[in-house]
Image (tube, rainbow, N blue to C red):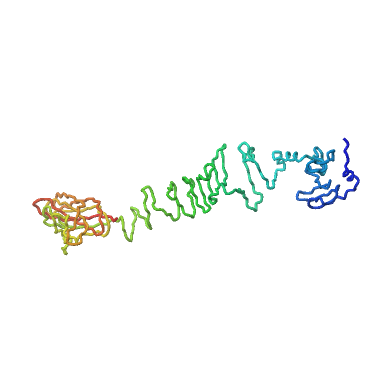
Amino acid sequence: MAIKDTEDIRLLRKQKANRPVFKQGFPSNREGENGDITFRLTENGLGMYGKVNNEWFKFADGLRIGRYGQSRKYSESGGWGKDVVGDKISVGRKLVSLKTATDLKTGLSLENVTNESKTTMFTQPVFTGDAGSGSNPIVNTSESNSIKLAFDDADENFEVRLIGNTNENFISFYQAGVAKWAMGFNGASSTTFRIDAGNDLATDVLQLTSAGALTVDSTVTSSNGVCSGTGALDAGSSTIDTTGAVSTGALTCTTINTGQGANEVYDMDQNVKTDSSVGFAEITSGAVVWAEFPFNVQNAIHNRYYFRDVDDLDDFRKWDSNDTDPTGFNYRNVAGSYTVPEDCTLLAMSGVVANAGATQNPTVFVFTGAVTEGTGDTTLSSAGSVAVSIGTSYVPTKFSDTYDVDLSAGDIVVPMIRSVNLGATPDFYGSLTLKFITR
């Protein structure tokens, strides 16, 4: 079919075109005349442009540069010519086929782009669409199941940045479509990094604040050494269990349980062991106190209780005061009795006794009581007694007893001896020692 000329085509054939020029930037429709050709250096590189119907067209990218056919105007824009399908243009020494915009978009789809140059660069790429799935991932790693991000400049910091909003921002890990782990932060507390065994940071199992405070919901186990640091270790009301050594600086706690129960710990600057020589400035609790009571009882009457006479200045060992019922202790006998200096507990008695010239048996008592200040009797209570069996006169016989009697500071302790043989008046001499422990 013959091509029908138009007035514009005839004019272009007859007039002489201007000499091509080289400039920078895209040509404006106000420049040049129809039929002119210009070369322009733009941000996209060097391009060749031709002006037809008062419009500039680039000789590339499949734009309006084909032959003029019977239908020389586009119905959409009113421009001359038509898209060339199958036409070719010479670029250097190569003949390049020109395609429509739709063909170009199809040909440039990512699935048709190969990495033949070993480097593929995207400038500010944007991936759009749904979130993808296990069978249809946004980034397909079916060849290796691996995504690697590598630095480009060894002199700069390497950073992978995830930018979220004021809601939860986290990375989640799935296994066969099931959420297993999530880590990130939520908008309610962006200063706390959280790890969750699932896909909901509201039920996290680990928290790390921007101040360095670490909180875990269960046990922290270390199989290769002890956690170390310069801050404080605060377990709150929880328990720290370990079978290894724990090395710390200052340890602040209320009690320490080493298997003997929860015990309070106090200052210590010396070893306190069974083989240690220990020195104390003052002992206020748990100290053992011994009190010795030598005695000499002469002509003891049956069923009378003999104790130290407080007004015998020449010999305190003489126990010649007596009473038939010592539970009501006369006030005249109180002032010379043994007085405990602080709260303590009477624990034991040990002694030795002999009968001077006979074999009658004595009974040894220990009475205690709080002092009544005044002329009234002081009430005494028996802590215990022990009957001593003497087989031979003048032969020393040992005796002992144990107690558990709490005493307060200022209480008196009165040991006594009673003869149990009717019709005899024996003489007893010896010594006894009482054991107390402070409390």
Residue extending farthest to the top is 1
Residue extending farthest to the right is 14
Q: Nearer the viewer, residue 139 or 319?
A: 139
Q: Residue 409 occupies which quadrant of the picture?
A: bottom left
Q: Nearer the viewer, residue 277 or 175?
A: 175
Q: Is residue 272 left or right of residue 335?
A: right
Q: Nearer the viewer, residue 329 or 63?
A: 63
Identity of the residue drawn at 72% across and 43% down: 117
Q: Quadrant of the C terminus?
A: bottom left
> Which percent across, then down, holds residue 207?
51, 48
Q: Is residue 380 left or right of residue 152?
A: left
Identity of the residue drawn at 49% across and 49% down: 215
Q: Is residue 90 visible?
A: no
> Which percent across, then down, holds residue 85?
80, 38
Q: Is residue 108 visible?
A: yes
> Which percent across, then down, holds residue 433?
22, 55
Residue extending farthest to the left is 423
